[in-house]
Amino acid sequence: MPDRRQAPGRLDRLPPQSFFLVSAVFHYLGPSLAVLLFARVEVLGVAWLRVASAAIVFTLWRRPWRLIGRLSAGERWNLVTMGLVLAVMNSVFYLAVDRLPLSTVGAIEFLGTVILAAAGARTRRNAGALLLTTAGVVTITSIRLTGQPLGFVFAFANCALFVLYILLGHRMANAGGRGAAQEGRPANIDRLAGAMVVAAAVATPWGLGGALPAFGHPMWLLAGAGVGVCSSVIPYVADQLAMARLPRATFSLMLALLPVFATVIGAIVLRQIPTVPDVAGIALVVLGVAIHQGTAIHQKTTTEINQKEQRGLRTAGIGRADGIADLPGHVDILPRLK
């Protein structure tokens, strides 16, 4: 019989880690450009320009209203909640980077993901990886609350919201099961597009007023749109592509690299040169991620070997597994949002 399985597309041929790297670069490239725009437009106004321009791009590209009728009540609630999180998270993130170095905000943003990664740390090697990455973040952060206490309030609020973004994003990326997510990625992007439209509506009451001066200066408006594409279109789409193929715990620990990207991009674009403790912290973070990825590769290889053996048994008619539910996997360790 002919093989009816769908041939992998161009995106399927790329490793999921490549999508994460794209997301990581633009995750801080966009905000660094936004910091430069703060001299012309109010902070919350820039945040609104980011969300609103991204919503326009997503609407023209994906036409998310076509998806609403096909969503269940739970999926609609997830979409609306994601929009609310995006609106508030982007706003408090900009309020934080207006007061603190980008590398510091990036390090604090990562701290919440330690909790997610810890849920998947079933081995001593993974636990050691978490200890290294956490130590690296603490080294990079070097928190001094006497300098900008309000900036740290916004930074930790962004940290908590970033955790919600990861949880909701994984639920959105894997709606209908991991197989459905991998075969129907456009639907996942449509959900993200709908969430971004919700985010733009939510952020309008506190952001539109500050953005009004940009409408009288086309270059400022164009810069705000560029921030939106760099910050909320490219990285969020890349996140969805990565989340659909990476276990949640693996993706969460890979986020340990975000302080590295924040430090490098902050130094290049904003001239925020890292100190010796910053460099030491980055080294610890990279080492921790490398240790975890080594464990993940070993686990993947073992799993592939077991799958091949099971396929051989089924071909021989031995020990058929029809009707037997799958055991909980790495992605199912964390409790799902209800």
Image (tube, rainbow, N blue to C red):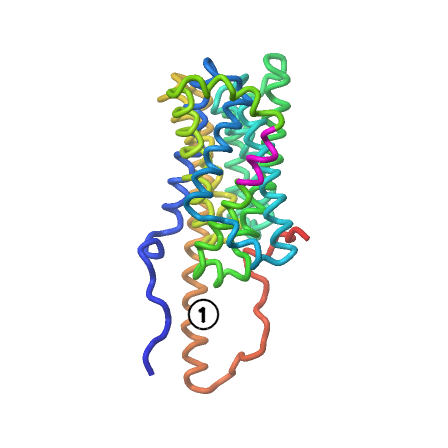
Q: Residue at x 38, y 40 (%)?
A: 22
Q: Position of residue 79 (x, y in %)?
A: 59, 47
The overriding secondary structure of the stretch rendered in magenta is helix
**Would residue 281 appear left or right of 127 to someone viewing this image?**
left
Asked whether residue 114 appears in the rendered view, the answer is no
Quadrant containing the N terminus in the rendered view: bottom left
Q: Is residue 44 above or below residue 24?
A: above
Q: Position of residue 215 (x, y in %)?
A: 46, 21
Judging by the rendered image, the residue that carries numbered circle 1 is: 306
Near-viewer residue (187 or 161): 187
Q: Residue at x 68, y 53 (%)?
A: 338
Near-viewer residue (49 or 33): 49
Q: Amino acid at mark 1?
A: Asn
SS assignment at label 1: helix
Asked whether residue 305 appears in the rendered view, the answer is yes
The image shows a total of numbered marks equal to 1
Q: Position of residue 151 (x, y in %)?
A: 59, 19
Q: Residues within 10 Å of mark 1 (few under 14, many from 20)?
A: few
Near-viewer residue (154 or 328): 154
Q: Which residues are magenta?
A: 197-204
Q: Is residue 119 above or below residue 54?
A: below
Q: Residue at x 41, y 20 (%)?
A: 220
Farthest residue, direction right: 338
Is residue 38 in the magenta section? no
Farthest residue, direction front: 216
Residue 111, picture quadrant: top right
Q: Is residue 135 above or below residue 333?
A: above
Is residue 198 in the magenta section? yes
Near-viewer residue (195 or 215): 215
Q: Position of residue 132 (x, y in %)?
A: 51, 37
